[in-house]
Amino acid sequence: MKKSIYGNPWLRTQADVNPDAPAIVSQHNRFTYRKLYEQAQQQAALLSEKGIGEGTHVAIVSENSEQYIVFIHALLLLRAVIVPVNTRLNEQDISQQIAFADCSFVIENNKIKSSGNKRTSLNIDTLLLMFTSGSTGEPKCVELTYKNILYNAIGTRLRLQINQTDTWLLSLPLYHIGGISIVFRSVIYGIPVLVPSDSGAEGIIQGIADYNPSIVSLVPTVLYRILRLGINPNPAHKTILLGGGPISDDLLGRCYTRGWKIVATYGMTETSSQIATRNPADTQHTGSAGQPLPFNRVRIVDDSGNEVPRATEGEITVQSPSLMKSYYKRDNLTARVIQDAWFFTGDYGYLSDDNYLYVVSRRSDLIVSGGENVNPVEVENALRQYPGIYAACVFPYADDEWGEVVAAAIVSDSDNITDKEIKRFLADKLASFKIPKKIFSVKNIPFTEHSKSNRRLIGEQIISQNR
């Protein structure tokens, strides 16, 4: 294990300077930083015996748990590359991601097995490979480094004014950048991660009651449930970091009325999580995602890439030490979205005169439902496999609870197709969150000048007809 001493400097430092401070608190365990370091070393030794070492790509397909966190730290000790996989995907999608990311080993439900792939990365500064959705349906695997994660953690600490008395609830799945960032930030700060019994809405709500966290990361869906249940803030409540989808003024107003302190944020996997975040004390810039985090620069550009005046809408571009190294194995795409060190997000918004970012629309083809990204092309392809459906257009439909839900307009040569039959057909082809919640039969689907389905137009038509 001598080689691993250079890995995971964050955990090693906390074990040295804060050995008795709590690192993980769950229903079944309480790890100090000393104990976590010892557990991670023991697990790293076992992983090393199986052939996992520096540069080995290791997929983790598991629900949130304290053992998952131990595996993360053990892999960091070995300087392996962590590849968290979305457990809500179907088996075929999971297998494809494991293969695309060149994972030699898979950790699933705390069991370690070889994938049969022996390729390892030559770029050992790489810490993390995380998949994110794209509009083309091709894999987008974001390559993040130790530097990326560290700078984002420092910027977050400065903006949220985090101190040693804070605790952070692990309220997002570890296969999301927002979830795994909690683990990295906590060990960098030396504060505990509080692990609820599960990462579903009920588990999070119970976790808030059980562990009394000062900071919770939420998507609007869960926050709506908290409000609907009439739950008041817990005694230690300091901040809810709210992102992952549209945030309505109505939602913010209801939170303030009940005493919940909401901090809106905007970010993505490619930037190691947060790009801009509101200051917790700021009550003047409702509707904005706040100013860029320290070390981040945001610029708004037109279709030609030229910077536009303040208060003018355009594409959001970002320059940051937290910006990804690349899209793994997709050099052409990387070169297309990163130009002169500026990342073109594909999202649209504007900057106010005092440098507050307002996000007008997220990536045009993506649907963000309850914090999950849905690629409409994938859903359309699955719908067209249903007998009788020969055209489909998938678009977002505003929803108070989920922010957006997946909706579909279909053209069919049969009058007997039911929504229930279509959803049952899609059940073994798509993850549950990708299956359309609303399905509308139409006579035809409008197209853009580029011969693509005009999602915006058909969405507007259908929404106006169903108000």
Image (spheres, rainbow, N blue to C red):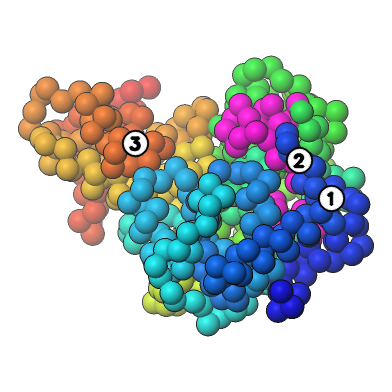
Q: Secondary structure at mark 3?
A: loop
Residue 416 left/right relative to 261: left
Q: Residue 435: give its label.
A: 3
For marks 3 and 2, the one nearer the N-term is: 2
Query: Is there any visible trace of residue 239 in the rendered image?
Result: no
Segment colored magenta: 181-209
Q: Position of residue 38 (x, y in %)?
A: 78, 59
Instruction: Look at mark 1 in the image and give the residue it sits on.
Output: 32
The residue drawn where x is 29% and y is 50% is 377
The residue drawn where x is 48% and y is 49% is 86
The residue drawn where x is 73% and y is 68% is 8
Q: Quadrant of the N terminus?
A: bottom right
Q: Considering only vertical position in the picture, is 140 above or below 444?
A: below
Residue 349 sits inside the magenta stretch: no
Magenta stretch: dominant secondary structure = helix
Residue 351 left/right relative to 401: right
Q: Considering only vertical position in the picture, is 285 above or below 42?
A: above
Q: Secondary structure at mark 2?
A: loop
Q: What's the distance in space between the residues labelled 3 and 2, CA to CA?
A: 37 Å
Q: Position of residue 315 (x, y in %)?
A: 50, 61
Instruction: Look at mark 2 in the image and give the residue it sits on.
Output: 29
Q: Position of residue 123 (x, y in %)?
A: 56, 80
Residue 373 left/right relative to 274: left
